[in-house]
Amino acid sequence: MSTILPVIQPGAQACTDIDFDEKLAAYGMELRASRVDTLQINVGKLCNQVCKHCHVDAGPSRPEIMTRETVEQVLDAIRNFRISTVDITGGAPELNPSFRYLASQSRSLGCQVIVRHNLTVMFQPGQDDLPQFFRNHTIEVVSSLPYFLEQQTDAQRGRGVFEKSIAALRRLNAVGYGVENSELILNLVYNPVGAFLPPPQQSIEADFKRELMNRYGISFNRLFTITNMPIRRFLDYLRRSGNEERYMRKLIEAFNPGTLDGLMCRNLVSVDWTGKLYDCDFNQMLDLPVAPELPQTIAEFSPEKFAGRRITTGSHCFGCTAGVGSSCGGAVATE
């Protein structure tokens, strides 16, 4: 089911006169899930940063926090259905009082656990031991770093963020993350600073590895390029700068049907801080839940009912299918 939302309020879905499902139909395609092996859990919108590209609209004043009761429901689903991957995000997920419980319990259930870690949260009160916590539970760390230079990073994430990010990366390296012959995985995420598509992932990864090592002695495993989605804070920026229509046209013109097989919504279900279910994190931020005939909350979840489901789409889906595509794991196509 495709949803085109009118422009009614700031932070809503970007406006386009081209329906995403109609675009797929022109290629004889539709977007359906294949399986569910990943739960991506947004444990709240509280964050110590206010990033310009944030599709969650997270920040220090956001009150939305997943309760321990909902965390227990998530863990019941993981336990009952043998979910293989738990991807914890926010906000800054570490600021949820139940974060460490959720992460450690998920690991004890045999899950791969990924944490979307913004690096600077490490310097918040009570969070200085995060590198050791991540190491002790062999948690995969994915961290956004807009660029290997201070000016570009601070322009997107706030003054002083780059300096703290470098210090945090050094602390992660010091406990074994992202270093050669270590099982501790540290991946970085690149989002463009402006209204354009990311460069080729392989080439900019090489640039990041060279420059971070030469300038700061920092190493990491992989760099993921992720397209800025025309949602919430980034959409507000597009509108303020007069770039909304141009950016949407850029995404639509770069549509690549070869990206569909690798889209994250095909093997993932997104859980919001209240326990509601969505096809992806972007749909969650637009309040586009899973199809009405499906279970709507994590307490009712069953992967059998979600395998093969039709994905709820909207104009923002052109962001994931432009160029080489975009997912939580970076590019999804080779060309």
Image: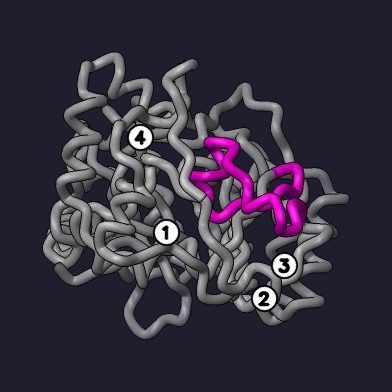
Q: Earlier in the sequence, mark 2 or mark 3?
A: 2
What is the total number of numbered labels drawn onto the structure image?
A: 4
Q: Earlier in the sequence, mark 4 or mark 1?
A: 4
- What is the chief secondary structure element of the magenta stretch? loop
Callout 4 secondary element = loop
| Residue at the disc numbered 3 | 104
* Magenta residue span: 273-297
Callout 3 secondary element = helix
Q: Residue extending furthest bottom?
A: 181
Callout 1 secondary element = loop
Q: Position of residue 115 (x, y in %)?
A: 55, 59
| Callout 3 crowding tier (Cα within 10 Å): few <14, some 14–19, many ≥20 | some
Mark 3 and mark 1 in contact? Answer it, CB < 8 Å.
no
Name the residue type under label 2: Ile
- Image check: 238 left or right of 272? left
In the image, what residue occupies the spot 56% across and 72% down? 308
| Callout 2 crowding tier (Cα within 10 Å): few <14, some 14–19, many ≥20 | many
- Frontmost of labels 3 and 1 is 1
In the image, what residue occupies the spot 82% across and 51% down? 70
Q: Quadrant of residue 74?
A: bottom right
| Residue at the disc numbered 4 | 230
| Residue at the disc numbered 1 | 328
